[in-house]
Image (cartoon, rainbow, N blue to C red):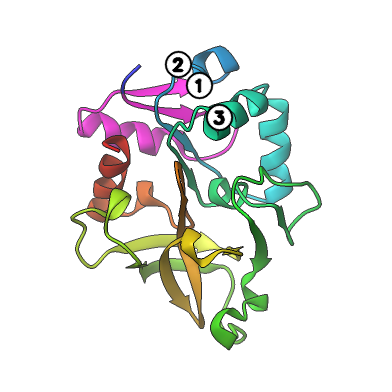
Amino acid sequence: MSGVTLVKYGLGNIQAFINIYHRLNIPVFIAENSEQLKKADKIILPGVGAFDWAMEKLNKSGMRDTLDKMVLVGKVPILGVCVGMQMMGQRSEEGALPGLSWIDADVINLRHNFFNNQHVNGHPLPHMGWNDVLPVTKDTIFKDITDPRYYFLHSYIMTPKNSADILTYSRYGGEFASAICKENVYGTQFHPEKSHAWGIDLLRNFAEL
């Protein structure tokens, strides 16, 4: 199957992704079970809401084991969005359930962000609205995107243990990782599906990996 498959496990703005890919004339599919997911050659894991709620829904969807096998063994490209990215880490301060552990990272509240010894206290939470995104490299999903700005809505951030897994930085009081990449695993803290031309270009780039 060519195109992009969206994991439908009860969270995320699925229709916004569908609309963008339809406009781009890129095939887009929905996976609600393991058999549908097994046909995917690129996957998007959307997410909104609390970490434990999202992990519980994914665990109960029947797709968790298949997703692990496709990502870790089959090396199928996957893009996690917002909580979908946070789920790729080890654990979150927001909950008690373990994450997917695809990225060696914890998820912390923005108020506990001491990245580069800078503290975010004094800035309102959630971090909501448009913000600059500074790519470490403009290959892959940021290819040919100029001065990217994306829409954020979150109170928690991923903190990769290995700086090589950080694809972009953004600033909200302190500096934080706003996108990650490790081999075939990509994640964005921001919402490309709500980010106009910058988001459309990123989703096109992901489909063309």
Q: Which residues are magenta?
A: 3-31
Q: CA distance from mark 1 to mark 2?
A: 9 Å
> Residue 59 placed where, x, y %?
71, 31
State whether residue 9 appears in this view: no
Q: Read off the residue under disc 3.
A: 73
| Residue 148 on the magenta segment | no
Q: Nearer the viewer, mark 3 or mark 1?
A: 3
Q: Residue at x 21, y 58 (%)?
A: 145
Tell me if label 1 and label 2 are in contact, CB under 8 Å.
Answer: yes
Q: Read off the residue under disc 1.
A: 31
List the single residue furthest toward the right. Answer: 96
**Where 77 sits versus 5, above or below?**
below
**Where 33 sits versus 109, above or below?**
above
Q: Amino acid at mark 3?
A: Val
Among the 4 quarters of the image, the one containing residue 16:
top left
**Where 59 sits versus 113, above or below?**
above
The circle drawn on residue 39 is: 2
Q: Amino acid at mark 2?
A: Lys
Q: Is residue 55 left or right of residue 180?
A: right
Sequence-wise first label, 1 or 2: 1
> Residue 138 placed where, x, y %?
27, 59
Q: Residue at x 26, y 41 (%)?
A: 204
Q: Residue at x 20, y 34 (%)?
A: 24
Q: Secondary structure at mark 2?
A: loop
Q: Secondary structure at mark 1?
A: strand
> Residue 190 placed where, x, y %?
44, 57
Query: 94 or 113: which is nearer to us?
Result: 113
Query: 6 or 134: which is nearer to us?
Result: 134
Q: CA distance from mark 3 to mark 1?
A: 19 Å
